[in-house]
Amino acid sequence: MKAREPQLEAADALIVGAGPAGLTAAIAAGERGRRAVVLEQLQRPGAKLLASGGGRCNLTNTLPPEDFMAGFGRQGRFMQPALAALDAAGLRRMLDRLGVATHAPDGLRVYPVSDAAVTVQAALWRRARAQGAQVRLGVRATGLWLEGGRLRGLRTTAGEVAAERVVVAAGGRGYPSLGGGTSGYHLARQAGHTIVEPTPALVPLVARDGWVRSCAGAAVAPARAWIAIPGRAAAGVTGDVLFTHRGVSGPAILDLSGDVAVLLGRQASVPLRLNLAPGTAAEEWRGRFQAWRVAEPRRAVVTLLDRHLPRSVAAAVAGLAGIGPTVRPTQAGARSLGRLATLLTCLPLEIVATEGWDHAMVTRGGVSLKEVDPRTLASRRLAGLFFAGEVLDLDGPSGGFNLQWAFSSGRLAGIAAAAFSAAEA
Ligand SMILES: Cc1cc2nc3c(=O)[nH]c(=O)nc-3n(C[C@H](O)[C@H](O)[C@H](O)COP(=O)(O)OP(=O)(O)OC[C@H]3O[C@@H](n4cnc5c(N)ncnc54)[C@H](O)[C@@H]3O)c2cc1C
């Protein structure tokens, strides 16, 4: 017969999720003398943190706070008090004290010098436990324990656990294999919170255009990508674009993907455009083709394009312009070359889907910010309840934005939860 799980002891603060937000909250609460118990449904803490940045963990960036908040769009200012509690410099100092030196090899994106996410995860885990936190792996919070409309603690797969303070740091829906799911939203709803419809973000896109398959694996670095909807700013995003078997990915595409996903909720497809060589105008391309006619009459257009683009992409785009693989500049008609110049600077793609939750690095949407106090991250619906990290309706682009938010909000929620007293509420 299977032994019964031991009941969990009551805690000063119960924290749902041992991701970066939950562990940072536990550390902050522990530093203020509160015994935290962290519940983690998986068998290891910080699974997403371990996978972040391709295992290198792009934990923050060097942008000043104003620019950092702007990366999160209109709602970015919500995070001001959290950044005041722990900004990028503060995070780097904290990690340094925990023995994890950090650096910004490109001057912007910050990584541990070890280039290994595990050093960050292990340091947080050690520090949380040194502060008296207990991390219960394999235990899932299934609901709030409410009595007479007041918060008593949590219902979990290991029984009811009493606590005056609960921090929901359960993350978003993406990557279910790394702990993504909807239970954070479920807990919030139970307290009367509104959930802004979660949508996949930082996610590869699926294109209707079958030709992309021939380019799978090729990267154009950099390209400019934008959503081509009338009335919408065409500024777009400049960065690397990677072709996949079903569409496009890479940093520039990932950063646009949240907006695309929201549009796909309203319409069947979204027109995307790529400039494959930002900085070279269509007119310049036409001039270049003329020069090729004179200087390189014996080489194929595709071979000449090779100097600027990966071979497979050069061949596909030339093909779309009606220029075959062996056609020379002198053989290609002026109309085809004109069309090629247009395609190189404004290549249309019809996006019909995202690759979905299994591949969404973050979630757009979540617990509505309107019902959470930015100064404490406390629920405006239920005393004693706090939120931290991706479960809230804030998402940033790639480049260390989302992890910094998890750390900053975790710290603020941990500090505020530690200071909370049910008797005074
Ligand atoms: C592949 C990948 C790469 C990424 N790379 C980067 C990067 O380089 N830089 C960056 O800034 N961001 C990156 N991100 C995003 C970043 O990892 C997340 O935004 C961040 O981890 C969110 O932190 P969190 O603590 O809020 O949530 P999470 O890290 O998701 O942690 C939440 C935890 O709660 C647990 N949990 C959920 N529900 C329950 C429950 N009911 N009971 C108990 N436990 C529960 C989950 O198992 C999970 O461990 C990446 C994401 C992915 C998936």
Image (spheres, grey):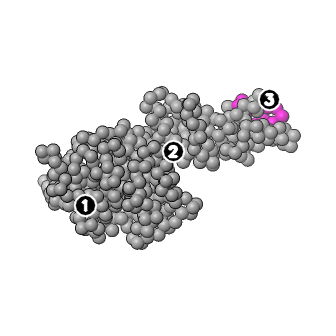
Q: Does the image show residue 67?
A: yes
Q: Which residue appears at 40% of the width and 67% of the height?
A: 94
User: Up-down: is 279 above or below 399?
Assistant: above
Classed neighbour count for the residue bearing mark 3: other residues with Cα under 10 Å, few (<14), some (14–19), many (≥20):
few
Q: 272 and 242: which one is in front?
A: 272
Where residue 236 appears, as percent x and y from the top left, is: 58, 41
Label 2–label 3 contact, CB within 8 A: no
**How many badges with numbers are in the image?**
3
Foreground label between 2 and 3 = 2
Where residue 326 appears, as percent x and y from the top left, is: 76, 36
Q: How far apart are marks 1 and 2 (CA)?
A: 39 Å
Classed neighbour count for the residue bearing mark 1: other residues with Cα under 10 Å, few (<14), some (14–19), many (≥20):
some
Q: Which is nearer the N-term, disc 1 or disc 3?
A: 3
Foreground label between 1 and 3 = 1
Helix, strand or loop for disc 3: loop
Q: Which is nearer the N-term, disc 2 or disc 3?
A: 2
Q: Say which mark, if any, is on residue 333.
A: 3
Residue behind mark 1: 419
Does the Cβ of the disc 2 residue fall within 8 Å of ligand 1? no
Q: What residue type is labelled 2?
A: Leu
Helix, strand or loop for disc 1: helix
Label 1–label 2 contact, CB within 8 A: no
In this picture, residue 313 sits left or right of residue 99 = right
Q: Which amino acid does label 3 sit on?
A: Gly
In this picture, which residue range is highlighted in magenta?
A: 321-334
Q: Which residue appears at 31% of the width and 63% of the height?
A: 28
Residue behind mark 2: 254
Classed neighbour count for the residue bearing mark 2: other residues with Cα under 10 Å, few (<14), some (14–19), many (≥20):
many
Q: Distance between the residues labelled 2 and 3?
A: 37 Å
Q: Which amino acid does label 1 sit on?
A: Ala
